[in-house]
Image (tube, helix red, strand yellow):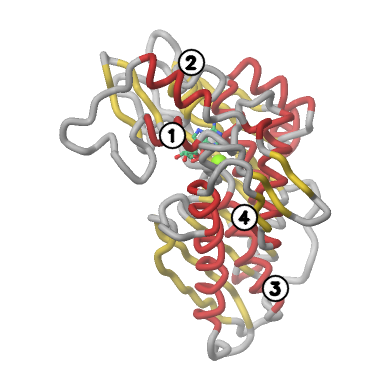
Amino acid sequence: MNRVLVPLQLDGAAPVLGAQAHRFCGETMGTTWQVIFATPERGVKPGLRAALQDELDLVVAQMSTWRPGSDLDRFNRAPAGTWHALAEPFAHVFEAAVWMANVSGGAFNPAAGALVNLWGFGPAPRYTDPGFRVPDDPAVQAALARSDWRALQWDADLRRAQQPGGVCLDLSAIAKGYAVDRVAQRLADMGLRHTLVEVGGELRGEGLALGGQPWWVDLELPPAVQGAHPLLPTRVALHGLCVATSGDYRRAYTHNGAIWPHTIDPRHGRPVAHGLASVSVLHEACLWADAWSTALMVLGREKGVALAAEHGIAALFVQREPDGRLTETLTPAMEALAG
Ligand code: AMP
Ligand code: MG
């Protein structure tokens, strides 16, 4: 049987009889977004689509490593010792990212941009570029020296951060989740209560779908391993709940027979290689689902399960066992949702 996860509390009225479903979609952050909502209104408010795109564009304009001239890009290029006032959304994500870095002992690291770039997962050079070479040890050490998040000074009163010199912020592990939250909030501000928002596989569900059912979503699983028994899907009722998944199978290359995923362990400066195939996290805020899934992906199953349990985080770990099988581990908070 499939595993089914349902929040401990279900509340709120279903969309009224005669409600209609609407869907909008587009592109952002090198991936796709979509929004589905159920409302009794036949038409949709003019400007709704543009309002949603505005939210996504704001996140890109402030926090993208890929958009030349974004606030983050300007911070990364700024001279050592300079202070930079951050817009409120950027500051919010920055503070959350630094919190996650502290709590995870640097497994999650918002200052890992130099390492991410070095391993070919930044804007350039890409690991897919012809002639791309795996970096040597001196290059890794040099990038590590520029990836210390503790060197970042943060002045909360003036909402400004100091560029210590050569540090490249990378908020890609958390900004997508934050964008999901912003879009969901914008829909709520427009009076829409029954909404499903997705950006690049990260989702937030509020209220209910047409027919009074929750928004049912299957957790993303690593691709099946040849010859091994496939994992059964885990179905989640996204009712006031978000999900994010980090995995070693998205954006990765193989080198000397090993998988080199785009998740870097900033404590030693190399892609993670402990056999964790994916981590999915459920949380009330997509920003936190996103941040935690990356942090746990770096920590690995043993340390990750322990830290998630300590913080009451609902997470599902999929491990590649030495014999090639995929096995699942649920944290206690995730077990509780499985009933
Ligand atoms: P996600 O898919 O949310 O796990 O985010 C992966 C992206 O986050 C990568 O493409 C990098 O840009 C960035 N990243 C990689 N390793 C880390 C890390 N240890 N901490 C924070 N961000 C990271
Ligand atoms: Mg993430």
Residue where numbered disc 1 is placed: 116
> Which label sits in the foreground, 1 or 4?
1
Residue 249 placed where, x, y %? 38, 32
Q: Is mark 1 within 8 Å of ligand 1?
A: yes
Residue where numbered disc 2 is placed: 274
Q: Secondary structure at mark 4?
A: helix
Residue type pointed to by label 1: Val
Going 50% across and 73% down the picture, which residue do you hit? 53
> Which label sits in the foreground, 4 or 2?
4
Residue where numbered disc 4 is placed: 178
Pick the residue in front: 110 or 160.
160
Residue type pointed to by label 3: Ala
Q: Residues within 10 Å of mark 1 (few under 14, many from 20)?
A: many
Going 58% across and 89% down the picture, which residue do you hit? 45
Residue where numbered disc 3 is placed: 188
Q: Measure the alpha-carbon separation of dots 1 and 4.
A: 20 Å
